[in-house]
């Protein structure tokens, strides 16, 4: 039981992980990137293709560019044997710059978050106790006599040897490995419907309008 | 990048325009009525400005994409 308590449970291993930040972080970053890209697109469109109206602040007029249209016209020759000739007729028309300049709508369209974590935990205790005890004893004794002229001889020797050895091993091993990868892909998105509608409306105005005979006498803005 | 606009003459076909070439003075024709369109001299500076802004915009988007590919750890 003492050994098992040393190993952290799987729940404990994962409890400290900031899962919210790991998953939410890249998604938040992708949203921020999309916002930046949309703002860049908006700024490009408004600064490049529109001018703020000097009379009406807050209202923007499209920048118009003048285009030249060259059309070949066959003119019949004058006279009986005259050959027809081809001449070029030039017409100029205006169209908004917005219809000529391409608009890219780039955005993060795919975010993949891969999180892989491997926890290896092992605990081992090797308790080996060696008690080596050796005792050696040695003793010798010798005695001699002759008390008359006082000759006494006593020899004694005691020897003792003792040794003790103790050894204990504890082995604990833990390894963690984590892999976290985020793949973000930004791709072309279709233009927003509102921008498409504006461009379509402008593009339709490129086509010349045929005025009725009566109203053709007076310019349209005076009607 | 090509931009399609409806032919103002015949209105039956689209004319494909390459803005960079248009800014350099190229003309583009309709495949149906063979009419040619080009930018008038008076508007050349406007379209050059627009094309330059488009290139800057593309570079900015590429920068943003680059930042996304190599995010900085905070």
Image: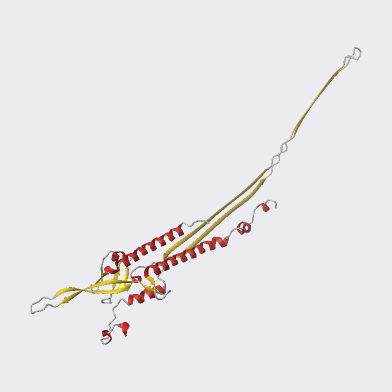
Q: Position of residue A200 (x, y in %)?
A: 36, 75
Specify the quadrant of the image occupied by residue A204.
bottom left
Q: Is residue A108 above or below residue B9?
A: above
Give the residue displayed 32% in from the left and 82% down from the top.
Answer: A221
Which quadrant holds residue A8? bottom right
In the image shown, does A85 or A54 lie closer to the viewer? A54
Identify the residue shown where x is 55% and y is 54%.
A178
Left or right, A117 with respect to A204, comes to: right
Task: Looking at this view, name the residue that lies furthest to the right.
Answer: A148
Provide residue B74's location: percent of width, then percent of height: 53, 56
Q: Is residue A45 left or right of residue A148?
A: left
Nearer to me, A69 or A54? A54
> Seen from this angle, which residue lies furthest left?
A81
Q: Nearer the viewer, residue A172 or A126?
A: A172
Total labels drawn: 0
Q: Quadrant of residue B10?
A: bottom left
Q: Position of residue A31 (x, y in %)?
A: 49, 65
> Quick one: which residue is furthest to the front in this view?
A55
Q: Position of A128 compared to A41: left or right?
A: right
Residue most toward the top? Answer: A149
Residue A132, position as x, y percentages in the image: 72, 36
Q: Quadrant of the C terminus of chain A?
A: bottom left
What color scheme is it?
Answer: secondary structure
């Amino acid at each position: 039981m003492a050994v098992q308590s040393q190993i952290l449970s799987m729940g404990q291993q994962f409890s400290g992980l900031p899962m919210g930040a790991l998953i939410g972080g890249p998604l938040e970053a992708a949203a921020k990137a999309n916002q930046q890209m949309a703002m860049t697109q908006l700024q490009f469109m408004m600064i490049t293709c529109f001018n703020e109206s000097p009379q009406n602040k807050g209202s923007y007029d499209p920048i118009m560019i003048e285009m030249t249209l060259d059309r070949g016209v066959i003119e019949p020759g004058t006279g009986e044997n005259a050959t027809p000739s081809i001449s070029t007729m030039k017409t100029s028309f205006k169209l908004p710059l917005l219809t000529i300049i391409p608009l890219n709508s780039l955005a993060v369209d795919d975010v993949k978050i891969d999180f892989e974590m491997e926890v290896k935990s092992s605990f081992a205790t090797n308790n080996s106790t060696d008690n080596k005890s050796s005792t050696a004893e040695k003793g010798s004794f010798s005695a001699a006599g002759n008390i008359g002229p006082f000759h006494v001889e006593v020899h004694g020797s005691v020897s003792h040897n003792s040794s003790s050895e103790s050894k204990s091993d504890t082995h604990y091993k833990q390894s963690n490995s984590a892999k976290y990868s985020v793949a973000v892909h930004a791709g072309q998105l279709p233009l927003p419907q509102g921008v498409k509608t504006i461009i379509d409306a402008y593009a339709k105005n490129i086509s010349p309008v045929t005025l009725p005979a009566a109203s053709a006498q007076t310019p349209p803005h005076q009607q | 990048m090509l931009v399609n606009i409806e032919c103002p003459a015949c209105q039956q076909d689209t004319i494909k325009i390459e803005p960079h070439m248009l800014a350099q003075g190229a003309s583009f024709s309709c495949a149906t009525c063979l009419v040619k369109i080009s930018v008038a001299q008076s508007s050349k500076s406007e379209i050059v400005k627009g094309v330059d802004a488009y290139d800057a915009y593309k570079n900015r988007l590429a920068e943003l994409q680059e930042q996304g590919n190599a995010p900085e750890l905070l």
